[in-house]
């Protein structure tokens, strides 16, 4: 259900987008689907596949679908940690995000045993 997160701008930017989703009236599952569709479209474009290449989309899902959802779940967990600790997620800069992310990564033995 969860994974190790890397300290990169892409992950932080996804976190910022989740803040908008959760602080608004957004549906997390729909938002996950939108992000996954964007990631898949980027894969198709970067690797020279047609945008409507169904077989390559299915291949991407078979290989990356579950790990990508685990990645998104872990980013959402950073949001939950902020809320539980009384930290306004909107005030979490990139360095603070990386700090929280690092602490979650240190708890991987616990996270990987959930579900």
Image: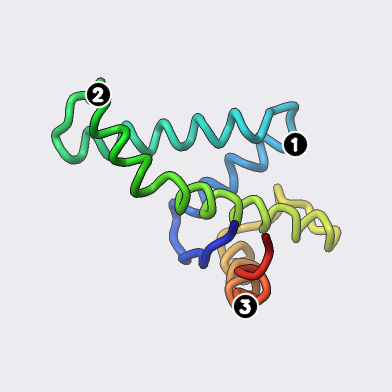
User: Where in the figure is residue 2, as x and y percent of width and height?
Assistant: 58, 60
Mark whose residue sits in front, 1 or 3: 3
Q: Is tag 1's residue or tag 3's residue first in the polypeptide sequence?
A: 1
Crowd band around label 3 with a 10 angstrom C-alpha radius: few (<14), some (14–19), many (20+): few
Query: Is residue 94 toward the left or the right of residue 64 in the image?
Result: right
User: Where in the figure is residue 88, as x and y percent of width and height?
Assistant: 78, 52
Report the residue marked by disc 1.
Answer: 23
Q: Nearer the viewer, residue 114 or 34?
A: 114
Res 59 → quadrant: top left
Give the structural element (helix, strand or loop) at label 1: helix
Crowd band around label 2 with a 10 angstrom C-alpha radius: few (<14), some (14–19), many (20+): some
Mark whose residue sits in front, 3 or 2: 3
Report the residue marked by disc 2.
Answer: 51
Label 1 and label 2: CA atoms lie apart by 32 Å
Say if 105 sits above or below 51 in the image. below
Label 3 and label 2: CA atoms lie apart by 39 Å
Residue 112 has which mark? none
The residue furthest top is 52
Report the residue marked by disc 3.
Answer: 109
User: Where in the figure is residue 98, as x and y percent of width and height?
Assistant: 57, 67
Q: Residue at x 37, y 40 (%)?
A: 61
Q: Is tag 3's residue or tag 2's residue first in the polypeptide sequence?
A: 2
Res 19 → quadrant: top right
User: Where in the figure is residue 46, as x and y percent of width and height?
Assistant: 20, 39
Q: Residue at x 60, y 69 (%)?
A: 112
Query: Is residue 81 toward the left or the right of residue 21 in the image?
Result: right
Q: Is tag 1's residue or tag 2's residue first in the polypeptide sequence?
A: 1
Label 1 and label 3: CA atoms lie apart by 30 Å
The residue furthest left is 48
């Amino acid at each position: 259900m969860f994974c190790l997160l890397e300290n990169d701008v892409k992950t932080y930017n996804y976190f910022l987008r989740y803040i908008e989703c959760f602080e608004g009236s957004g549906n997390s599952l729909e938002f996950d689907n939108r992000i996954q569709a964007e990631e898949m479209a980027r894969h198709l474009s970067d690797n020279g596949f047609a945008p409507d290449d169904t077989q390559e989309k299915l291949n991407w899902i078979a290989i990356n679908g579950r790990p990508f959802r685990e990645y998104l779940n872990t980013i959402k967990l950073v949001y939950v940690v902020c809320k539980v600790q009384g930290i306004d997620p909107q005030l979490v800069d990139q360095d603070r995000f990386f700090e929280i992310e690092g602490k979650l990564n240190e708890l991987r033995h616990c996270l990987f045993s959930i579900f």
